[in-house]
Amino acid sequence: MAAKLNDKQIKFVHYLMEGLTDHEAYCRAYGYEYDKLSTAKKSEIRSRACKLKKKDNISPLLEGQQAKWVESSDIKKEDVLKLLFRVINGENITDRTVTADSEANGKTTTTHSISVQWAIEKLCKMLGFNEAEKHEVSFGQDVTREELEQELKRLEALQL
């Protein structure tokens, strides 16, 4: 049987369920101010958060919650596909935004139509017809393979 959660672990799970990232949830639960931490400490926090999330007494709670979220989701993939097909087939789908006008105490309605081109682009992306997108990541400094391997070894040695 999985071990009981301590107060900080309960907070960590709670913050994850609110939608925070792993390291944000860890920092809130354990009282760290992420922005004030050194780069090395930030790396350690990310590693600890990842390991904590995978623990036997936490992982099943999160998986159960994720299953509930999927079941209760307001919008399903099929609904989005149907909407996109309606736009492609010529139906005019609009999004209306109503805002209060402070000077006249009236309301202003702004309408945005979904373009056929946009719908086709989204549909192709959802169905996997697009080529993979390339994203370049920069760390602000060049890091050698040796430095990455050393950092990986250091993180593995932490073994929470």
Image (cartoon, rainbow, N blue to C red):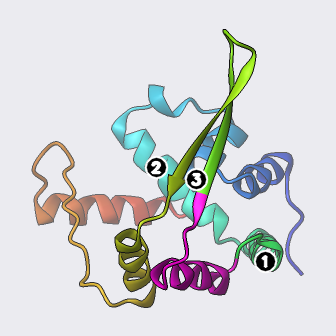
Q: What numbered label is drawn on residue 60?
A: 1
In the rendered picture of this protein, how many numbered marks are placed on residues? 3
Which amino acid is tagged 1?
Pro
Looking at the picture, tell me which residue is in the foreground, 81 or 69: 81
Q: Earlier in the sequence, mark 1 or mark 3?
A: 3
Secondary structure that dominates the magenta span: helix
Range of residues picked out in magenta: 76-94
The answer to which quarter of the image holds residue 124 is bottom left
The answer to which quarter of the image holds residue 102 is top right
Give coordinates of residue 55: x percent, y percent: 69, 71
Of circles 1 and 2, the one toward us is 1
User: Dot 3 corresponds to which residue?
Assistant: 21
Is 17 rendered above or below residue 103?
below
User: Dot 2 corresponds to which residue?
Assistant: 44
Any part of residue 160 in sight: no
- Residue depicted at 85% across the width and 52% down the height: 6
- Residue depicted at 38% across the width and 79% down the height: 120
> Mark 3 touching mark 2, by CB under 8 A?
no
